[in-house]
């Protein structure tokens, strides 16, 4: 268990790391955030977070980066407040696609993956297991991420993209969103990736099942991406 002060420092550090993909220093946090603490006091708390396995320090940097444990803390804290936020513009974009393509689920899947990858800057796949058909989009978004400069990230991403259709069942998607961070991913114990997945709400009487997964770097914008999939299922349920 971490203190309230450590929690505030950790959340601030993670927000900055998610923006930049660069290690964050105590001096930077002291300058940008009003914690009422000097740089050395923040550094002590960051060291405590290292000892608690929430942060780690790259050998070549004075800054710190979050661990999988920190991402899980960050996401779990966010889920408490996520329903309080409403991205109206995102919901409207998704609603327009569903309304336009309501009679053609395959066309809808193709249009949705394009729009969702654009909005999330992530790789999106929608998979109909009964038909063994998938729609994918977002490769161009992924290659623009700074993580794509590293061979390990490229290898893990390509492996997931190749394997996820056949191994979707291991993710056990449900109507409620599931989030796999780093080594939590059952398909691949990743050091660099996260997956957000869910079973898409059926809009047809035949109850045809489809699954959706969003794949991206661990430092993805979880709040936005969770909201996007929540909005999609909410809109689909309203068209039943």
Image (spheres, rainbow, N blue to C red):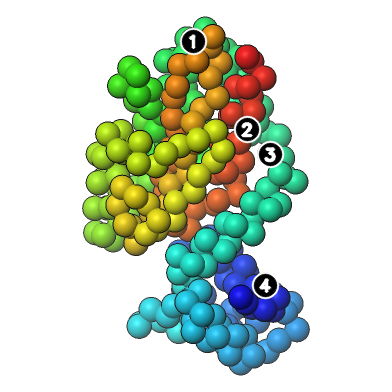
Q: Are marks 3 and 2 in contact (CB under 8 Å)?
A: yes
Sequence-wise first label, 1 or 2: 1
Identify the residue under disc 4: 8
In three-dimensional space, the C-alpha distance between marks 3 and 4, rounded to whole angstroms, equals 24 Å
Instruction: Give me the C-alpha separation between circle 2 and circle 4.
Output: 28 Å
Q: Residue at the location (58% across, 62% down)?
A: 74
Name the image quarter holding the N terminus.
bottom right
Cα separation, mark 1 vs mark 2, equals 22 Å
Residue at image mark 2: 231
Q: Quadrant of residue 213?
A: top left
Whether residue 195 is visible here, answered yes or no, is yes
Is the residue 50 above or below the residue 94 in the image?
Answer: below
User: Which quadrant, please, contains the C terminus?
Assistant: top right
Choose mark 3 or mark 4, whichever is in front.
4
Question: Mark 1 sits on what residue?
Answer: 206
Q: Residue at x 70, y 76 (%)?
A: 4
Residue 87's mark?
3
Residues at marks 1 and 3 touching, judged by CB atoms closer than 8 Å = no
Lower position in the chain sequence, tag 3 or tag 2 = 3
Circles 3 and 4: CB distance less than 8 Å? no
Residue drawn where x is 64% and y is 55% of the image: 78
Residue at 57% in and 64% down: 73
- Seen in the picture, residue 178 relative to 99 is either above or below; the reply is below
């Amino acid at each position: 268990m971490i203190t309230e002060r450590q929690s505030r420092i950790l959340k601030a550090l993670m927000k900055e790391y998610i923006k930049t993909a660069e290690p964050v220093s105590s001096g930077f946090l002291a300058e940008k955030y009003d914690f009422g603490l000097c740089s050395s006091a923040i550094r002590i708390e960051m060291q405590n977070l290292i000892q608690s396995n929430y942060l780690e320090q790259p050998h070549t940097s004075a800054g710190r980066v979050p661990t999988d444990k920190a991402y899980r803390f960050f996401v779990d804290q966010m889920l408490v407040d996520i329903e309080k936020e409403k991205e109206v513009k995102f919901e409207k974009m998704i609603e327009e696609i569903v309304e336009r393509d309501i009679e053609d689920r395959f066309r809808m899947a193709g249009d949705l993956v394009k729009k969702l990858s654009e909005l999330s800057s992530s790789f999106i796949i929608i998979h109909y297991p009964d038909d063994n058909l998938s729609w994918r989009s977002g490769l161009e978004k992924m290659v623009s991420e700074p993580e794509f400069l590293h061979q390990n990230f490229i290898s893990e991403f390509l492996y997931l993209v190749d394997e996820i259709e056949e191994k979707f069942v291991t993710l056990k998607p449900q109507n409620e969103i599931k989030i796999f961070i780093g080594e939590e991913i059952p398909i691949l114990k990743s050091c660099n990736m996260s997956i957000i997945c869910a079973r898409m709400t059926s809009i047809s009487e035949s109850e045809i099942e489809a699954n959706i997964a969003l794949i991206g770097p661990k430092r993805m914008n979880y709040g936005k991406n969770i909201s996007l999939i929540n909005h999609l299922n909410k809109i689909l349920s309203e068209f039943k």
